[in-house]
Image (cartoon, helix red, strand yellow):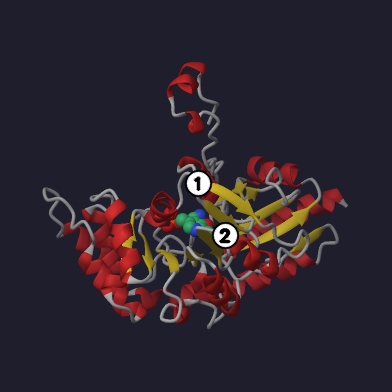
Amino acid sequence: MAELSERMRALVQPHLAGIEPYDPNFTPTRINLSANENTYPLPEGVREAIDAALAETPLNRYPDPMSNELRAELAARHGVDPACICVGNGGDELLFNFLLAFGGEGRTLLNCPPCFSEYEFFASLTKTGVRNVWRDRKTFAIDEKRMLDAARDADVVIVTSPNNPTGDVAQPGFIAQLCRVCPGLVMVDEAYIEFADAGTSVQNLLAACPNLVILHTLSKAFGEAGIRCGYVIAAPDIIDVFGAVRQIYSVNVLTQAAALAAVRVRDAFAPVVERIRSERERVAMALEAYDWVDVWPSQGNFLLMHVREASSIREQLRDDYSILVRDFSAAPGLNDCLRITIGTPEENDALLEALAELLDDDA
Ligand code: PMP
């Protein structure tokens, strides 16, 4: 988006005058591997179940504000009480509400970039100060010691696991320590957790860590980014706050119905997730064969690669091959980095073939 007009800069709240909204940098292409969506067709029967649920949903009534049926289904899936869950219009809404409620003027978000840029954006919207503890420049490992030191003065902490865009996971032991030392709330964003190895989620820590908040979404493993449905799991008194600050009807009736139908059959997604995990390893191995390319190990449905002239490679992929990937070259700490979503085997082959041509030209 262009900068605000001079007139608007004078009219908006002063802290919003320089705001740069998140830009997914989307261009329609034949193959879109830029937004970490699940590009596989929905498993058999899922679309039919969603369509049937939508067809039965009255549109003339306001939605149930707390999505109670969906909440109960999610609670059963996670083995928690429904009072421990708040559903939102995508994970994004919950991230915003988290900072709205627990951040704000005079408060500090502890962040460990490079990570999902929305955290800093929502911090700026809510006037929350940001303390960045940068990851290792080469490995992107979290600086656990500095994070633990900084957490003592933080009001909110967000750690992404697996991290977008670097792909690594946070160790549950480290998260437990963070929760112990932080006087405020610690959110672990598990948007991509279904793609990670078993035992990676910090859900087991919830009982011992009353200040832990876990974020989930149906946008990634469950292939429903268009539905806009995310949820947080946390202690009931934290959930009460999420419930209090939210716009009451943000999760509309169609989202609730579609999400409920999808969550009821969510086991059907397991083979798709398995496939994406194995494709991820296949694509990583193929990319590692190039001298010019570095790939970081990833537990998400994406890979971060460092390649000379990344912006030019991304443009050629888009313009000459109609394949869209995400360019992070301009992001601090991610010079010459591209993030590629793992797609279907056909999509991945098309990407690898295109890269083979481009990288051979480059040699
Ligand atoms: N967290 C992370 C780390 C993400 O990458 C995303 C989406 N890109 C989200 C949260 C939000 O997802 P959604 O709003 O689609 O639920």
292 vs 118: above or below:
below
Q: Can residue 228 be seen in this view?
A: yes
Q: Which amino acid does label 2 sit on?
A: Asp
Callout 2 secondary element: loop
Q: Where is residue 41 in the image (x, y as percent from the top left)?
A: 43, 64
Left or right, 259 with reference to 328: left
Depth order, front residue of 330/101: 101
Q: Image quadrant of residue 239?
A: bottom left
Mark 2 or mark 1: whose residue is earlier in sequence: 1
Left or right, 273 with reference to 313: left
Q: Position of residue 143 (x, y in %)?
A: 70, 66
Q: Is mark 2 within 8 Å of ligand 1?
A: no
Depth order, front residue of 343/124: 124
Query: Which residue position is annotated with label 2?
Result: 153
- Which disc is residue 265 wearing? none
362 vs 146: above or below:
above
Q: Where is residue 248 in the image (x, y as percent from the top left)?
A: 24, 51
Query: Which residue position is annotated with label 1?
Result: 106
Q: Position of residue 331 (x, y in %)?
A: 68, 46
Q: Which amino acid does label 1 sit on?
A: Gly
Residue placed at 61% from the left, 56% from the top? 115
Left or right, 99 with reference to 87: right
Q: Is residue 45 visible?
A: no
Residue placed at 63% from the left, 68% from the top? 148
CA distance separating discs 2 and 1: 12 Å
Residue placed at 47% from the left, 20% from the top? 10
260 vs 305: above or below:
below
Residue placed at 42% from the left, 50% from the top? 96
Circle 2: is it few (<14), some (14-19), or many (20+) Cα within 10 Å? Answer: some
